[in-house]
Image: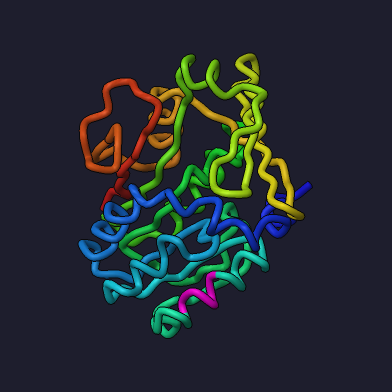
């Protein structure tokens, strides 16, 4: 089952499901403004990051596999009056339909974890590198769960938002999270595949990047081995 079909199934509840996820917006908007734009956002989804970036005056090229998610993003951009700055394109982040070369590529909300193995993650990183101008930057976030988080959530249906439930089934052997989301009528399950920070660092360098920063949270605190990893990478000149 492709990721686009999986997200098509929950496109109508994606925004209510993720409504509390706001901590990353400021960082991605700041990076976009600092770059001067345009920005390519891979796995743009419903425009949760792209529209605030556009409202800051930066043009965004947003790529996503899901036609239903892109439709939501288009509606959001139109509703906020920035549709002229949001260029939405359907495609795979490993082969993005983008000919432009830009100063910044972003992959928010842990989307690279949909890549099932290191080979596919490396392919996605190299695709991002191919879109960048010399000296351009790639910013993305991922996670590696703590044992406490696994113990607290494994196999349990939890009400994340009113009427929207999610269940995490963790496999430590394969380092895979099967995340199920359901509303009153909508439901899907998708997998996320995590890596350690050293493994990500190796892949980033193999893709041709230099790591400028690794943060442990979106307030730019230094990474000290926690769950969250926010990578800021640069394509050498």
Bounds of the magenta segment: 73-77
Vertical placement of residue 82 versus 127, above or below: below
Question: Taken as a whole, is the magenta stretch helix, strand or loop?
Answer: helix
Q: Residue at x 62, y 47 (%)?
A: 164
The residue located at (45%, 61%) in the rendering is: 48
Pick the residue in front: 199 or 69: 69
- Is residue 169 shown left or right of residue 185? left
Residue 109 painted magenta: no
* Position in image of residue 206 (x %, y %): 44, 35
Q: From the viewer's perspective, tell me whether residue 220 is left or right of residue 145.
A: left
222 vs 66, left or right, is: left
Q: Position of residue 88 (x, y in %)?
A: 53, 73
Give the tally of numbered discs.
0
Q: Is 74 colored magenta in this rendering?
A: yes
* x, y percent for residue 61: 45, 70
Residue in view at x 50 percent, y 57 percent: 42
> In this picture, is 209 found above or below 93?
above
* In this rendering, position of residue 219 left or right of residue 100: left
For the residue pair 17 and 87, the one nearer the viewer reads as 17
């Amino acid at each position: 089952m492709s990721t686009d079909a999986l997200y098509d199934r929950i496109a109508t509840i994606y925004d209510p499901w993720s409504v509390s996820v706001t901590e990353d917006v400021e960082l991605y908007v700041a990076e976009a403004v600092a770059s001067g734009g345009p920005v390519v956002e891979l796995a743009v989804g419903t425009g949760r990051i792209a529209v605030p970036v556009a409202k800051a005056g930066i043009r965004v090229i947003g790529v996503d596999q899901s036609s239903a998610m892109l439709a939501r993003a288009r509606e959001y951009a139109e509703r906020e009056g920035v549709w002229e700055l949001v260029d939405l394109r359907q495609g795979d982040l490993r082969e993005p339909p983008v000919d432009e070369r830009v100063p910044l590529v972003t992959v928010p909300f842990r989307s690279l974890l949909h890549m099932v193995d290191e080979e596919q993650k490396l392919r996605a990183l190299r695709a991002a590198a191919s879109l960048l101008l010399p000296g351009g930057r790639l910013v993305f976030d991922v996670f590696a769960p703590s044992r406490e988080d696994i113990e607290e959530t494994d196999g349990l249906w939890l009400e994340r938002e009113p009427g929207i439930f999610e269940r995490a089934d963790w496999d430590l052997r394969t380092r895979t999270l099967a995340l199920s989301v359901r509303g009153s009528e909508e439901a899907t399950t998708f997998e996320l595949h995590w890596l350690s920070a050293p493994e990500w660092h190796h892949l980033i360098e193999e893709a041709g990047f230099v790591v400028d920063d690794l943060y442990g949270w979106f307030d730019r605190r230094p990474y000290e081995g926690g769950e969250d990893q926010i990578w800021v990478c640069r394509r050498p000149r």
